[in-house]
Amino acid sequence: MHSHPLPSYLDPQHPGAWGMYLEQIDRVTPYLGPLSRWVETLKRPKRILIVDVPIELDNGTVAHFEGYRVQHNTSRGPGKGGVRFHQDVTLPEVMALSAWMSVKNAAINLPFGGAKGGIRVDPRTLSRGELERLTRRYTSEIGIIIGPTRDIPAPDVNTNEQIMAWMMDTYSMNEGATATGVVTGKPVALGGSLGRKEATGRGVFTVAQEAALRLGLPLAGARVAVQGLGNVGGVTARLFEQAGAIVVAVQDHAATLYKPAGLGVDALLAHATAQGSVHGFAGAEALPRDDFWRLPCDILIPAALEGQITATNAMHITARLIIEGANGPTTPEADDILAERHVLVVPDVIANAGGVTVSYFEWVQDFSSFFWTEDEINARLVRRMQEAFAAVWETAQTHQVSLRTATFIIACTRMLQARELRGLYP
Ligand code: GLU
């Protein structure tokens, strides 16, 4: 074994999301057989780009923001993963998110590696014009490493179809030709795919159905708690309610609400859209933030940010089933506590893979300039998610490991097989 000096970005005192990911890799390594000789590859991102993003604000002053694009692994294909605009974005966080994209894409067997980008900014403080200038300058700065065959961004926290349209336009202007395939999650009028917006939530719901079936837990009448009512949490909550489940609790950045009889998802989402938060929604009990993790429920859907389910709150969780809509919501210590308490966790890298799966369909449609119907897209999405879940379930049974480690076994085996077949250059 050769010695590997610690990379500069690793702070053992504050492991954060990247530390969580490294721990997950350590847990899968014993199951990788001879391929484990390549595992160090997965502990280092292939390529990291940090960019300064200066923009002129509406008041005439110039503001600088820090932007990132990390390509974690490209053994199986171009980089693929979203772009996040958030005031707390850091480089190690984007590194972890890019690595989870590699695992996710390999777990679903999409022909992509993993990448992620972000800007350290609170987009709520920007006007629409400032947001557009920020997006365009960032796109131009990362333009030296992205492209339809190199690395394909998509929406993530606080980014949406409009931002993808500006990214596509900026890249295309610089190239001198319209390149729809450079980003996914675009508006349908610009080469986007039907069903893409709802795809992550639909995928979360599909794996929830599969997991609940295996637990003997009927969805009709099941009590559901959702953290985060963005694109993922909102669609997921709606699909659960349509299946007869009762959404009893929600938490967003501003409020925690509980109503045992059911909150009523349509009214709740309408309130959140109008007010910017669920805060003040009539008829529900408002609770302190930490109480969210103790509320009586059968299914818990973290659909916000990473590091939410921790050693501190994992012992209070009442749900039998956790479906990770967010990326990285559960720490490895919490994973152990939940396993001991027989709470089944369907990990992010399979549970929220519906979004990037339809991103793949969008990319394929853009390349062939031939577009599919929404029914075709949804049917293919559901089939792929069901097949991937079944493979993960079987691997977990075979090795007697968690669904997270099982997903990592499948994904890391695929990535490292590709690595070995390609060989080291030069
Ligand atoms: N941001 C989403 C994720 O975390 C989607 C990425 C994509 O479609 O490329 O999976």
Image: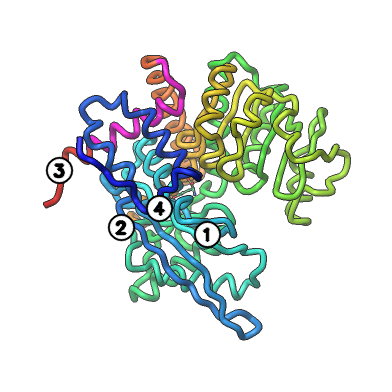
- Residue at 53% in and 34% down: 331
Q: Quadrant of residue 265?
A: top right
Q: Inspect the image, locate mark 2, and give the three-letter code of the amino acid beneath it.
A: Arg
Q: Earlier in the sequence, mark 2 or mark 4?
A: 4
Q: Are marks 2 and 4 in contact (CB under 8 Å)?
A: no
**In the displayed structure, would residue 137 be above or below residue 181?**
below
Q: Earlier in the sequence, mark 2 or mark 1?
A: 2
**Crowding near the residue tagged with mark 4, few <14, some 14–19, many ≥20 C-alpha atoms within 10 Å:** few
Kindly identify which residue carries mark 1. Answer: 187
Q: Is mark 2 within 8 Å of ligand 1?
A: no
Query: On residue 150, which mark appears?
Result: 2
Q: Earlier in the sequence, mark 4 or mark 1?
A: 4
Q: Earlier in the sequence, mark 1 or mark 3?
A: 1
**Crowding near the residue tagged with mark 3, few <14, some 14–19, many ≥20 C-alpha atoms within 10 Å:** few
- x and y, in percent, of residue 214 in the image: 53, 16
**Residue range corresponding to the magenta coloring:** 400-417
Number of numbered discs present?
4
Q: Inspect the image, locate mark 1, and give the three-letter code of the amino acid beneath it.
A: Pro
Query: On residue 9, which mark appears?
Result: 4
Please identify, in this view, whether the residue under mark 2 or under mark 4 is nearer the observer: 4
- Residue at 48% in and 72% down: 53
Q: Quadrant of residue 162?
A: bottom right
Q: Earlier in the sequence, mark 3 or mark 2?
A: 2
Q: Are marks 2 and 1 in contact (CB under 8 Å)?
A: no
Examine the rendering and report whether any part of residue 358 can be seen. Answer: no
Measured in 3D between alpha carbons, the distance from the residue under mark 2 to the one under mark 1, in whole angstroms, is 22 Å
Front residue of this view, candidates 171 and 60: 60
Kindly identify which residue carries mark 3. Answer: 423
Measured in 3D between alpha carbons, the distance from the residue under mark 4 to the one under mark 3, in whole angstroms, is 27 Å
Measured in 3D between alpha carbons, the distance from the residue under mark 2 to the one under mark 4, in whole angstroms, is 25 Å
Please identify, in this view, whether the residue under mark 4 or under mark 1 is nearer the observer: 4
Element carrying mark 1: loop
